[in-house]
Amino acid sequence: MIRVGIPRALVYYQYYPMWKAFFEYLGAEVVVSEPTNKEVVASGSSRTVAETCLPTKVFCGHVLSLAEKCDYMFIPAIRSLQKDSYNCAKFLGLPDLVRAVVPESPPILDIDIDIPGGKRELYLNIYRLGRHFTPNPFKVRKAVKVALDAHQAYLNLMSTKKLMAPQAIEEIEGRANGRRENHGDLKVALIGHPYVIYDDYINHRLISRLESMRVSVLTPEMIPKEDLERYVIKLVGRHYWTYEDEVTGAGGYYIEHGIDGIIGVMPFGCGPDSLMMEVVKRYAKQAGNTPFMLLSIDEHTAEAGIITRLEAFVDMIRRGKRSEKG
Amino acid sequence: MRVATPHMGNISIALNTAFRELGIGNIVPPPNTRRTLSLGVRYSPETVCLPFKVTLGNFIEALELGADTLVMPAGRGLCRFGYYAKLQEEILRELGYKFRMATVDLFGGKIFSVIRLFKDLSNASYLKVISVVRFGLAKLAAMDEVERVVHQVRAVEIKKGTASKLFKEALTAISEAEDYSSLKRIKANYLEKLREVPANHEANPIKVGVIGEFYVLLEPFVNMDIEVELGKLGVEVKRSIFVSEWTKFSLFLNFFGITEKEKLHKAAEPWLRRDVGGDGWETVGHKVLDADHCDGLIHLTPFTCMPETIAQNILPSIKNDVPLLTIVCDEQMGKAGMLTRLEAFVDLLKRRKARKEKYQKFQQGF
């Protein structure tokens, strides 16, 4: 059986169930890298130049850790999902970048995803990808359908049950150990890209830390898609980045829906975030003075520093609420 | 109306002349200084790229002088650049300035967007606007032509700084030219003067290609006059981007489909198959193509520039025989540090070239 490697980084959190359904329908075995650990970060950072953003470094580390374990590496180049909006350069050049910095990687299955580029081009690209596994175009077509159904089920699971991406993936794979109940007296929204919010190693277990401070954590995936889009338009006029929803859209939505505080999680060197977080920060101040904290994380971020800032932020919100009551 | 536009190499000179000719009141922001940069840095998001910070500083200084309309390119360039105008406007409004932001969508509207901008700002007829734009482009072409010669002369001139001084004069003279014939005369005049600069014509200077991101290549303040400094070290600079060429394929519709850019993309293809926005793809192409006629390459990039970071990661995997030095420009950059790196790099190139020549002589000896 052909083994396809999927690095547990970047858009893994958004599309993994879809990809897995696609490849498994075509008769391949899907191999996912282990959750990020020290070695992944270290090996990834040693391959790339220093200015590269943290998620890209982590991605290269994951590719390295998978190199021996699979026959193909699946790395899509997601160009654009919507007319007139484009993705960050790191996503556009991801397959080429990996090819350059991780030469020991097995052959890379790269596929250009460019939705505004037209259906024909997209289907041709998908067929080209499927041809590695089957010569039968109808089978590829059926695989696409299965994959899309799996994706829709995944999205529904997150927005109806208010699950976070890793929990939803666990549930789909039947490994869920029950939904963690969340009894917090504060509601804090985390905004940022899934590959930062859900990667427990690079953000130093941010979510569980907050939960242990009796905070219930909300993430962008819990908002229906239409609302996200509405708020992007409200804040910046139109979509500029492909993954603008999860920062400006989610930020705008939560600010107007009675949240106690917002934490923006930004990896160091992230281009789009450096602007989008600024937009959210300004909006939080203008509309209702919602507390906003920007956590910038990189491979050196010391755990103690993050804990101190989180505690201070949560204390500040609590005190604010108390004085309001009094 | 008092229009202001940020400094961007020779482009802002041409733009300001065009404003004057169309009778649009304009304010030239003070030249880029440490103050411009620190103003920009103070009010910008921390990790945004350098051009954002410097142009924001320009706007603040222009508004202090009483500007009421700001001109900024926008649109989709596949990188943060298109987002600049929107956020800068918000930041400036929060600082309490009152102004109008006029954006130019260079990527969608091409040359028409420039014409529309001038038309919006002035009362002139389309005919007048078009003729001014055309003349402006001719001026840019003249400036570039002089600059190319300046690059050559700087490397060999005996009294360092002569060519740079002449170039400064030439820029002023060209921007003040009234019509095509005087423009032609001025150009010819300065080319002649440059040719007469006392120089060591025997010297065979090493050639260094300067490649990378548009803004840091063209704005001497942010790259710390790298071209002048290389000239002082006796290096002939071959810059990859000249505004007049850039406008040719960026502003005009390309009827034949064959451009310099496509050649670069084709060369880059084995290493980078897709457009990554900004100038990333072209940078990779230059590394492949310039190896033949340059002794070394210097790659300039603003700190955290997304397309150039991709290029920077890919460049070392192109194994051709040309040394490469990457210089990352940001507000923390010190001139002394850069000079040391340049000197070391140029030393290396000189020794390399001497060794090569010696080897060739040795071979011929047999």
Image (cartoon, rainbow, N blue to C red):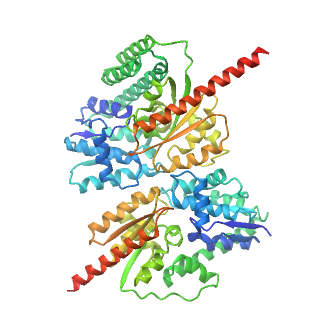
B161 lies above or below A294: above
Image quarter of the C terminus of chain A = bottom left
Indicate whether B210 appears above or below A269: above
Image coordinates of residue A286 in percent, x first then y, are 26, 66
Q: Quarter of the image containing the N terminus of chain A?
A: bottom right
Tell me the residue at 57%/44% (across/down): B281
Residue at x 44% of width, y 15% of height: B158
Look at 48% across and 63% down and name the residue there: A243
As rendered, which of A94 and B250 lies closer to the eye? A94
Q: Position of residue B215 (x, y in %)?
A: 43, 40
Whether residue B275 is visible, yes or no, is: no
Q: Is residue B135 above or below residue B2?
A: above
Image quarter of residue A30: bottom right
Residue B104: x, y in percent? 37, 44
Q: Is residue A128 visible?
A: yes
Give x and y (percent) for residue A29: 74, 71
Is B243 in front, or is B35? B35
Q: Left or right? Give the position of B334 relative to B25.
A: right
B172 sits left or right of A245 in the view = left
- Residue B358 lies left or right of residue B150; in this view the side is right
